[in-house]
Image (cartoon, grey):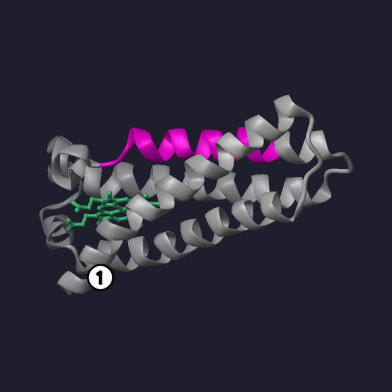
Amino acid sequence: MDIILSLHSRLAYVVLTVLVLALLNGFWGLLAKRSFGNRDLRLSLFALIFSHIQLLIGLTSYFVSPYFSAWENGMGAVMKDSTLRLFLVEHPTTNILAIVLITMGWSLHKKATTDSKKFFRIAVFYGLGTLLLLSRIPWEQWL
Ligand code: HEM
């Protein structure tokens, strides 16, 4: 199942890049008091779609990862080992929460009645989601 893990690893570059572009575009649009146009909509939507694809591949990676068998030794053994805890508990839970925030940002931006509110919601929710993602990336193994 190396193909799934490799896809998850490579897609992470795309997801993080598009998310950072979308959130910077949000802050920039807000500060420049621009109107929220088609380009802004598409960039935010791309970031949402890529995050969701990565979430699905991440969920699959979880069960095919060599780390998964560590659960056989019980919860205590997983929690005591910082690497296992990162891959089996912290990375998945934090990243699911991050995608929830990003999805909330997308839905709330659609409900917003002014352009500045749209930019604000994308910027803040995508920003918080991205910070959460960055906080639990296994940097040493990835790069
Ligand atoms: C947008 C969300 C996510 C991003 C950006 C992300 C990113 C990454 C990155 C960069 C790695 C390291 C890959 C490598 O070592 O080459 C990784 C590994 C992993 N991720 Fe995610 N991930 C996300 C969501 C998830 C979710 C939701 C789950 C599970 C529910 C998950 C499960 C895993 C597992 C199990 C590994 C370890 C795979 C292995 O090396 O055996 N990921 N992830």
**Residue at point 17%, 74% (across, down):** 1
**How many marks do you count on the picture?**
1
Q: Does the magenta stretch include residue 11?
A: no
Q: Position of residue 15 (x, y in %)?
A: 42, 52
Q: What stretch is highlighted in magenta?
A: 121-137
Quarter where residue 79 is shown: top left
13 with respect to 21 (left or right) = left
Q: Is residue 123 magenta?
A: yes
Q: Which of 64 and 16 is in front in this view?
A: 16
In the picture of the structure, the residue carrying the numbered disc 1 is: 4
**Residue at point 48%, 40% (across, down):** 20
Quarter where residue 113 is shown: top right
77 with respect to 21 (left or right) = left
Q: Position of residue 101 (x, y in %)?
A: 58, 44
**Relative to residue 10, is residue 4 depicted above or below?**
below
Which corner quadrant holds the C terminus?
top left
Q: Where is residue 36 in the image (x, y as percent from the top left)?
A: 78, 45
